[in-house]
Structures are given as C-alpha cells and as structure tokens.
Image (cartoon, grey):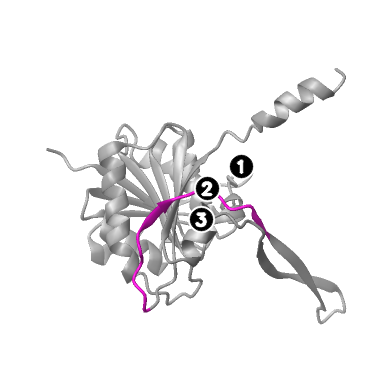
Amino acid sequence: MAKPLILVSNDDGITAPGIRTLVRVAMKVGEVVVVAPDSPQSGMGHAITIGNTLRLDKSIALEDLGVEAYECSGTPADCVKLAKFHVLKDRQPDLVVSGINHGSNSSISVLYSGTMSAAIEAAIEGLPAIGFSLCDYGHGADFSHTEEFVEKIIREAIEHGIPENTALNVNFPKKSEEPIKGIKVCRQARAKWQEEFDERLDPHNRKYYWMTGSFVNHDKGEDTDEWALVNNYVSIVPCQFDMTAHHAMAIINEDWNF
C-alpha cells in the first residue's frame, strides 16, 4: 500500500530547527514533500503575495534528511498554494502539517500566526491540516519531548481524518523536568496581547517604534488551551476559517432597524 503523502511547511523558514523535527517525524509516517519560506515569516498571519513575483527553488537545506524540498520567497500561505497547484500538481496530499513553530500560537496568537496560516490555507483548499507550535521562542529550543506526540497526532489524523473546513492548532509546553501529562482538546482561551510601543530616535533624530507588551489571559476556564499548556498538557484547538459571528446575526436582525 502506498504511503500517505504529507506536505510540510512552516513560517520560521526552511532552515529553522523546528521544521527539521517535523520532517523527521512525518517521514516515519509517510512520503514527505517540503515547501517552506526561504526566510522567516513569523507574524505574517494569512498574508499572500499579490504585487510581487514569487520565487520557488529546490532547496538543499534538508538534503541530509533525503527529502524533496523547495524554498519559496513568499508567505506560508503562498507556500501551500504553490505546493498544491505547482509542486504536487495532480497529487493530493493526505495531510498538510506546519511547524514546529518556535513560540506559542495559542489563544489569540492564532490570528497572527504564519504557522497556522499555512494550515488554514490547506483547509481552505479542502486538505486536512495541522499547525504545530512549541512554547519556546529560542532558536536552540529543545523539541525532543514533542516528537512522540507529533507522530501520534499525525497518525490519528491520517487514520480518522479531520473535520471538513477545519485545521488543528496544536501547542506544546516548553520542555521541563516534568514529562508531558497528555493531550487535551480545548477551546481557544479569551486572552490578548497588551501592546506597548517603545519610542526611540534614529541617528537623524526621527522617531521610530519597537512594539513590546505582555500577554494577558483573563480566561479562568479549565477547558482552554492556555490552561492545558500551563498544566503541562499538549493542547489541540480545532480552528475554522468561517469567521461569521452567528450569535451576532440574530441580535442585529432583531434590534437594528433595517
């Protein structure tokens, strides 16, 4: 029986350590093709390239793993589009996986995430997809404790499928002395980034800004991704690209005078 075809992408770029871990694990399960950005694209959200050209070249970044790999000048969403319509052409991936991201994409961060934009783009194209992220922003982050869970989740997704129009947002706690307790299927916590802007002057005495701030979680629920991660569980949040606020439709239709 033919191995399942797994497309791998990310937003940290094709040379990031996280994608190497994801590729190695995915190769245990199926045939792997990689299409990833040629440079970091963190925080790009679901941006696509419209006014500029896109470059797509064979990559040697992962040649030691013996995998077919391409690097793209565009965004994570661009990578998935080019993979589906150009690299793979008539071959349909059985699963698209993105990551493993260097840094959390839990809660509200999913909206800004390039990692999850690759997964969401795949879901838009009718492909089952998962974004993986580790709550450790360091370039030298240790991914070893994620591997057994990544493999399990990939195998489960291929065997049982992922609900239509859905992508899974998977986050892992940072490695610690305590082993991961297990996996929780969660809702997205109601939390946000409280931004601040550090104002500075350049050598020409012109103002510029660095965005800083802190993550604020006001959600005390024990069914959220933030609760799971703080308590050393892997969190899985099923995400959809239909952003319709159905509860608001009823309120507007009832209260507004149209």
Three-letter amino acid code of the residue under disc 1: Ile
Residues at badges 2 and 3 in contact (C-beta under 8 Å)? yes
Name the amino acid type tagged 2: Arg
Mark with earlier residue (2, 3): 2
Q: Which secondary structure lies at badge 1?
A: loop
Question: In the rendering, which numbered label is found on residue 225?
Answer: 3
Quadrant in which the C terminus appears: top right
Give whichever of discs 2 and 1 has the lower sequence position: 1
Residue 71 lies, in percent from the top left, at: 42, 56
The quarter of the rendered structure image containing the N terminus is: top left
Q: Quick one: SS at disc 2?
A: loop
| Gap between marks 1 and 3 measured at Cα | 34 Å
The residue nearer to you, when weighing 34 against 180, is 180
Secondary element type, mark 3? helix
Which residue is tagged 2? Answer: 187
Residue position marked by numbered label 1 in the rendering: 50
Q: Residue at x 45, y 33 (%)?
A: 125
Residue 104 location, x and y as percent? 52, 63
Please report the bounds of the magenta region as a residue range: 177-192
User: Which residue in the rendered view is the most extreme toward the left?
Assistant: 1
Above-or-below relation of 72 to 141 = above
